């Protein structure tokens, strides 16, 4: 056998190993690289200027994005600390955030961060060996629309039929959730009238801005809310200036039904004895998120006998909310953690003495059990008296718009009012 053949046979396993590594070993997870731009895109001098853009998907972090771009961990930490000084948390960048990295050869000299639904992006640039941060405005076009939606089968169906997306549905629920139970109160032929804002940012799709005003005209319940803002205050108020936001959420989760009510004597389905049930059982699929009903501090977290995995949140004015039978806890939840209203503290499960997945939700007031469905939910601070005249003027412009919804003249009037206010 010739020497060349022996040499080829000797090297064959190494070639095969390289091929297998290329095919089997995946790239860094969840990072989508767009085509690199050339120097002409940036009108810069230098033969080695180029860029790459990375889009955050689920599971990404700023560190693994910058690692994929070739930056050392120590250098990335400098960027994280610089952002932290400017009150920007790299750990909280949402899915869809874009990181655009500029290279001079292999050296990174600029990092631009574009976050969804922001009116500006921030740029991290290296000047004489030191990183600096600046904020750059993004051109924004705003338009205002007023529509009426009629419910035939569901709120989602009504909004879709009206040509709008699910995001508007969630915005409507978020504004009206203090007054309306969207599980029980919604009826066929109920109407929703909404004055809302749309935003077009440079290089992005059209998105929704604020709901400016909304009216729910239902068979069983009606409600309205108006968004008022100035340099000192902002929020949703009713016609009299009362704050729409309450101190507690009405429900701690999205549930399918109430499987057991508050009772002084209930037959326990597992223990087979009669005993008090100081809570409300909400049936829901395993893994359904559970939210803190209000601002507070985690007082207890752990396994508590028949209650299974359990969390207690201490609120102001002597209130405590209790969440039992969790399948797992929310991220970062531990004793002493401060939580805001709507923070995920856990997920529905059937831990402890439970016949199926549900949340056993309880509330105490000054150490005594109270019925969660009958608890007082004080409203937030009303509109200060000194702004009442401005608010009345605002209502006088907004209210007439609802009288002729659907007419072209109304749409023109909407645009006129807001274009004048913004100029």
Image (cartoon, grey):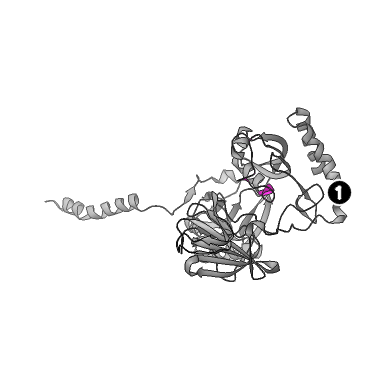
Question: Which residue extends farthest left?
Answer: 1
Q: Which residue is mark 1?
A: 390
The quarter of the displayed image where residue 335 is located = bottom right
Q: Nearer the viewer, residue 284 or 41?
A: 284
Residue 167 lies in quadrant: top right
Q: Residue at x 86, y 44 (%)?
A: 393
List x then y, in percent, for residue 298: 59, 68
Is 183 covered by the magenta stretch? yes
- Answer whether residue 165 is magenta in the image: no
Could you tell me residue 94's position as x and y percent? Answer: 57, 53
Quadrant that contains the C terminus: top right
Q: Start and end of the magenta stretch? A: 174-189
Q: Nearer the viewer, residue 151 or 234?
A: 151
* Left or right of 416, for residue 181: left
Residue at 66% across / 44% down in the picture?
Answer: 172
In the image, taking residue 96 as reference, residue 208 lies left or right, namely right
């Amino acid at each position: 056998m010739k020497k060349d053949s022996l040499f080829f046979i000797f090297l064959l396993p190494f070639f095969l190993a390289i091929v297998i590594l290329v095919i089997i070993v995946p790239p860094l997870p969840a990072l989508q690289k767009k085509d690199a731009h050339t120097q002409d895109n940036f009108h810069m001098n230098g033969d080695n200027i180029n860029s790459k853009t990375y889009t955050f998907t689920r599971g990404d972090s700023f560190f693994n994005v910058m690692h994929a771009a070739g930056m050392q961990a120590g250098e990335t930490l400098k960027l994280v600390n610089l952002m932290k000084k400017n009150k920007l948390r790299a750990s909280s960048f949402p899915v869809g955030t874009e990181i655009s990295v500029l290279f001079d050869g292999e050296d990174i000299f600029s990092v631009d961060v574009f976050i969804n639904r922001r009116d500006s992006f921030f740029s991290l640039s290296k000047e004489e060996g030191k990183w600096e941060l600046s904020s750059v405005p993004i051109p924004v076009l705003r338009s205002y629309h007023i529509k009426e939606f009629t419910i035939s089968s569901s709120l989602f169906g009504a909004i879709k039929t009206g040509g709008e997306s699910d995001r508007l549905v969630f915005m409507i629920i978020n504004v009206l959730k203090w007054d309306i139970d969207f599980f029980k109160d919604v009826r066929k032929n109920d109407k929703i009238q909404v004055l809302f804002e749309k935003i077009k940012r440079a290089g992005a799709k059209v998105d929704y801005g604020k709901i400016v005003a909304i009216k729910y005209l239902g068979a069983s319940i009606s409600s309205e809310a108006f968004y008022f803002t100035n340099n000192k205050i902002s929020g949703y108020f009713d016609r009299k200036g009362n704050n729409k936001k309450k101190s507690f959420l009405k429900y701690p989760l999205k549930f399918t039904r109430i499987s057991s009510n508050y009772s002084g004597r209930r037959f326990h389905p597992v223990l087979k004895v009669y005993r008090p049930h100081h809570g409300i059982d909400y049936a829901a699929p395993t893994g359904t998120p559970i939210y803190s009903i209000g601002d507070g501090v985690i007082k207890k977290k752990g396994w508590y006998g028949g209650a299974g995995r359990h969390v207690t949140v201490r609120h102001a004015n002597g209130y405590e909310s209790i969440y039992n039978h969790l399948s797992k806890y929310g991220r970062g939840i531990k004793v002493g953690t401060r939580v805001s209203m709507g923070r995920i503290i856990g997920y529905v499960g059937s831990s402890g003495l439970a016949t199926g997945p549900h949340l056993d939700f309880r509330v105490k007031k000054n150490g005594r059990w109270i019925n969660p469905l009958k608890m007082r939910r004080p409203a937030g601070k009303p509109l200060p008296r000194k702004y009442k005249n401005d608010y009345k003027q605002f209502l006088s412009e907004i209210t007439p718009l609802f009288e002729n919804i659907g007419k072209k003249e109304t749409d023109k009037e909407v645009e006129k009012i807001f274009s004048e206010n913004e100029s």
